[in-house]
Image (tube, rainbow, N blue to C red):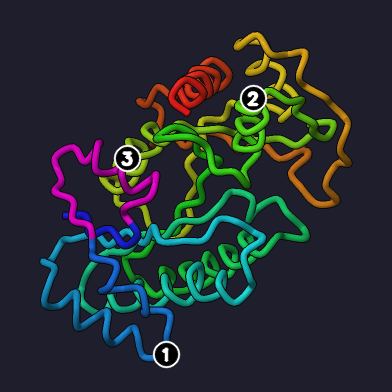
Amino acid sequence: MLQLIGGRGRLGQALLRHSGHQMVRLLPREVYEHWWQDGSAERAAHYFSANAAPGDTVCVLAGVLDPKQPEDVHDRVNFALPCHAAQGAIDAGLRVVTFGSVMERFMSHPNRYVATKARLSEWIGRLAETGAPALHLQIHTLYGGGPPSPFMFLGQMYEALKEQRPFAMSSGRQIREYHHVDDDAVAINLMLDAGVSGLAHISHGEALTLRELALGVMTAIGKESQLLLGELPDPASDNFAGVLERSALLDSLEFRKTVPAVAAEMQTALASG
């Protein structure tokens, strides 16, 4: 069984849709919402000992993505809570999976979100080195499962299109992979079935620049005239060169082609919004 902490978000709901042969259980928020506090690893171990079975996997999906949220919020939700949940799950004899961002590998000056996820990655890595069944999965930018979040690149594009105003952006040299959330749910299950531990990433290997993404999507929906490239400055720290290869474990998975799939999701969101 998969036991999901923070399972009501985009990725958690996708895991519910693509659970395959596994049963999935969403932990009530009131169970884990204070697990960032000191002593919570023991409370988590006690909970899992009473509410899980040998062979279960705990997926810690709870997180704060918006880098503008206060630093202490990121520390609590993106680092302390998953560390305590992971230690409690391991102490109860379970497997644990935490989630981060591939940007942990690329940003020399990470924002609050990426910085806390990098700390979590290091912590889980040390846990795995002891032989514990622990995995930290670094994922790329997700889309699908509803309108994009306003603080994300696609969310800003969506808001501009919805309000019928120009979409201003940087030169768009930043390199990204975009993944449909349902594709990543399938990929996660493949990783779990393979028994991967330590640090891993889910990549399809078909990276593109934000310029290519924006031009492709805006052109596909007939709004290319609203795109203002180079109107904003490029970020000081970002991924301008790094590309990850697809894991051999994911060779059987056919990821959606980024531009047409993102354009279709954008059109759906605009039609329903």
The quadrant of the image that shows the N terminus is bottom left
Q: Nearer the viewer, mark 2 or mark 1?
A: 2
Residue 77 x/y as whole percent: 48, 70
Residue 197 x/y as whole percent: 38, 58
Toward the viewer: 202 or 269? Answer: 269
Outermost residue toward the front in this view: 163
Indicate which disc residue 38 carries.
Answer: 1
Of marks 3 and 2, which one's residue comes earlier in the chain? 3
Residue annotated with mark 3 = 14
Label 2 packing within 10 angstroms: few (<14), some (14-19), many (20+): some
Residue at the spot x=56%, y=69% of the render? 74
Residues under numbered marks 1 and 3 in contact, where contact means CB atoms less than 8 Å apart: no
Calculate the distance from the C-alpha at mark 1 to the C-alpha at mark 3: 31 Å
Residue at the spot x=48%, y=67% of the render? 125
For residue 75, side relative to residue 127 (left or right): right
Quarter occupied by residue 187: top left
Q: Please check the rendered image and state whether residue 18 is part of the magenta-colored stretch, yes or no.
A: yes
The disc labelled 1 sits on which kind of residue?
Asp
Of marks 1 and 3, which one's residue comes earlier in the chain? 3
What element does badge 2 sit on? helix
Quarter occupied by residue 113: bottom right
Toward the viewer: 225 or 211? Answer: 225
Residue at the spot x=71%, y=60% of the render? 110
Q: Which residues are magenta?
A: 7-26
For residue 217, side relative to residue 95 (left or right): right
Residue 270 sits above or below residue 137 on the image: above
Q: Please check the rendered image and state whether residue 28 is part of the magenta-colored stretch, yes or no.
A: no
Q: Nearer the viewer, mark 3 or mark 2?
A: 2
Label 1 packing within 10 angstroms: few (<14), some (14-19), many (20+): few
Indicate which disc residue 161 carries.
Answer: 2
The disc labelled 3 sits on which kind of residue?
Ala
